[in-house]
Amino acid sequence: MAVPTLAKVSFDAVELTNGAVTQLTFNATEFDSGSFVSGDTFVAPSDGYYHIGFRAGLSETMNGKYWRIFIYKNGAALTSPIYTSGGNDWVANSVAVDTWLDASDIITFYVQHNYGANGTLWAGSYTTHAYIYQLDDYPGTFSSARVYLTSDEILAASTPEELVWDAESWDTDGYWTSGTDLVVPSTGIYLVVATVAMTSVVDDVVLMASTSVNGSQFSGAFNNWNHENQEPPDNQMETVLLLTASDTVSLTLEQRELNDRSVESGAVSGTALTIVRLGDQS
Amino acid sequence: MALSNAILVGTQVPSLATVANNTWTSLEFVTTADHNLGGWTGLNSTSLTVPETGYYLVTAGMWWGATNGVTLGLRINVEAVNRREVNFSSGANNTQILPLVDIMYLTADDAITIQVYQNTGGALAYGNTATPTLNGSYFAAHRMDSDASPSVEGGLSWSQLSTKGRVLLT
């Protein structure tokens, strides 16, 4: 296995002025095999195609407001999802994009909200982090698994539930046999993608999702989707994790509707958890 | 190293200025050849053909005009079957980019289509550009289980790309 050209950072818990587009500052570098990190920016080490992921949250109770997260390239917005808060709770969302970068191109991360007063970034590496890796770094051996549900799963209101998977679409290295956990076969850096689909229309509902590592709900990545007057919502979250052999990865969901809500099953477009080994740590 | 079977393309609604209400509408894949590594076909149409069987990291995004309190959707179909969808409630009367990411096992000659949805009650503006920016929309995919050099006719080599330095998603 090769070491991927990759970096991942967390951010400082800064105060965010209402309405202002604010650049986030790096708090800690979890790993940086590509020498990307320079101050509060990622700098592309060479020409190439890159995958960039960004997740950020606002630790304020939102309702009917927006939370916007930006990836900037050379001072201009590359992509900027904007999320509405309809569930009267904190928000945390993510975005990932593929792009071409010239050597020395600069990537920075911004957020914006209209909470109504100044708010605080929801810091903590599981909620607010960013990563970048060069797509043309092939790890040498493809190692991956994807698991899904074969029947819809009922989520009781305000009760976190670790999903018990029913089947797998593929599994190159025995990641899954049964139950909730994908078991990592070897130490390395992994890309984890969770796709969540619900079966019914929701209104003013908070849907929380976290990729847990070794049973710790917030050790992986966390999204807090606040839906308002919504068709059956389908969402995704992605993260990059440094994992040790035998670590377990699972997906926990919670919904805060007053009534039970169901998670949609299905191998094709239902709720699923996918893991891919990107390479060695060093 | 080489990036296998990768593509970065813009997307747009053919010949339309807006997307109709409550209708899943197919987008056209629009690009130059510069970001087509490995023989994807179907550019400038609504159906993109997978060049080789494998596991692909897929990302897509759709820019929408300002909306409030409606559902916005983005869907990737493979062989006319919904493979992955994302939808969100919009709000605050603002523009929005709807992002999608997934890892998919795709078979050679699979037809990929991208569809978008909105239920504002009327037509809605979208990101219509072949060179996506903040106001554009895009689709990207690359094969994760092979480092074979692009060899399919029509694909450009990595060295050609590096020399050209052509930027699509800027």
Image (cartoon, helix red, strand yellow):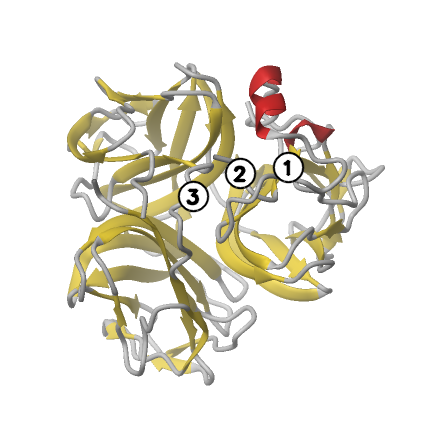
Q: Nearer the viewer, residue B60 or A102?
A: A102
Locate residue A3 relative to residue B123 in the image: left or right. Answer: left
Residue occupying the point 50% across, 71% down: A270
Q: Are marks 3 and 1 on the same chain?
A: no
Label 2, label 3: how far apart the Cα atoms are: 8 Å
Residue occupying the point 65% across, 49% down: B120
Q: Report if residue A104 is visible in the image.
A: yes
Label 1, label 2: how far apart the Cα atoms are: 7 Å
Q: What amino acid is found at the position of numbered circle 2 in the picture?
A: Leu
Residue occupying the point 34% across, 30% down: A111
Locate residue A164 relative to residue B138 in the image: left or right. Answer: left
Locate residue A133 relative to residue B40 in the image: left or right. Answer: left
| Residue density around tag 3, few if under 14, some if 14–19, many if 20 or more, within 10 Å | many
Q: Nearer the viewer, residue A161 or A231?
A: A161
A14 relative to B102, above or below? above
Q: Secondary structure at mark 1?
A: strand
| Residue density around tag 2, few if under 14, some if 14–19, many if 20 or more, within 10 Å | many
B74 relative to B137, above or below? below
Q: Secondary structure at mark 3?
A: loop
Give x and y (percent) for residue B97: 53, 39
Give x and y (percent) for residue A84: 42, 46
Say which quarter of the image contains residue B139. top right
| Label 1 close to label 2 by CB (< 8 Å) | yes
Q: What amino acid is found at the position of numbered circle 1 in the picture?
A: Leu
Question: What residue would you read off at disc 1?
Answer: B37
Label 3, label 1: how far apart the Cα atoms are: 15 Å
Question: What residue would you read off at disc 3?
Answer: A138
Q: Answer with mark 1 or mark 2, whichever residue precedes in sequence.
A: 2
Q: Nearer the viewer, residue A16 or A142?
A: A142
Any mark on residue B3, and which? Answer: 2
